[in-house]
Amino acid sequence: MPISGQAHIRIARPSRDLAAAERFWKDGLGLSVVYRDEGGQAPGEHALLMLGLPDAGWHLELVHEAGAPVDPRPTEEDLLVVYLGEEVPGALVGRLEECGGRRVESPNPYWNRWGVTIEDPDGYRLVLSVRDWSNS
């Protein structure tokens, strides 16, 4: 079956600290925990945290393998963009910072003009865009 616009998307990333990542994505941004597996300590066993929204066609999967951890290596262009379609609430940015995020400038002036960029505890970047998808 070919891919379609109805296909579900999973964005998978390694994490140094799932508790810190959960605080940022759940408590800071407001995503829900979709699934959790505490995993084990033996090689090949990993802890898994999936976050998303109940009605979304995507979710974020964060993985940590204690026996053989993978260090996240994001670049400043590894972005997860959320189109809000309105001004970015200052309270949301403040909450993300309180939950371990760090506001940063983007090397791409487009994102500085049309949104706010925040690094998560693993160094991946979240862009909250004032635009909506139809005019992105």
Image: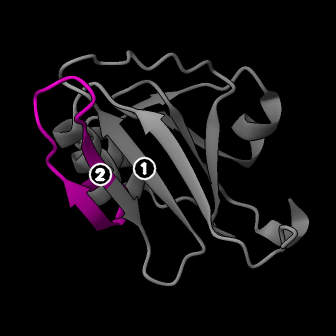
Q: Is residue 136 magenta?
A: no
Query: As drawn, which residue projects farthest toward the left?
Result: 41
The answer to which of marks 1 and 2 sits earlier in the sequence is 2
Residue in view at x 43 percent, y 54 percent: 90
Q: Is residue 45 magenta?
A: yes
Q: Secondary structure at mark 1?
A: strand
Residue 49 shows which numbered tag? Answer: 2
Where residue 135 sits in the image (x, y, percent)? 89, 66
Contact between labelled residues 2 and 1, with CB atoms less than 8 Å apart: yes
Where residue 66 sits in the image (x, y, percent)? 18, 24
Residue beneath disc 1: 61
- Asked whether the viewer can see residue 93, the reply is yes
Q: Which residues are magenta?
A: 27-49
Residue nearest the observer in this picture, 4 or 105: 4
Which quarter of the rendered picture does the C terminus lie within? Answer: bottom right
Against 109, residue 62 (above or below) is below
Residue nearest the observer in this picture, 102 or 66: 66
Amino acid type of disc 1? Glu
How is the rendered protein coloured? one colour
Residue 15 shows which numbered tag? Answer: none
Where residue 124 sits in the image (x, y, percent)? 50, 30
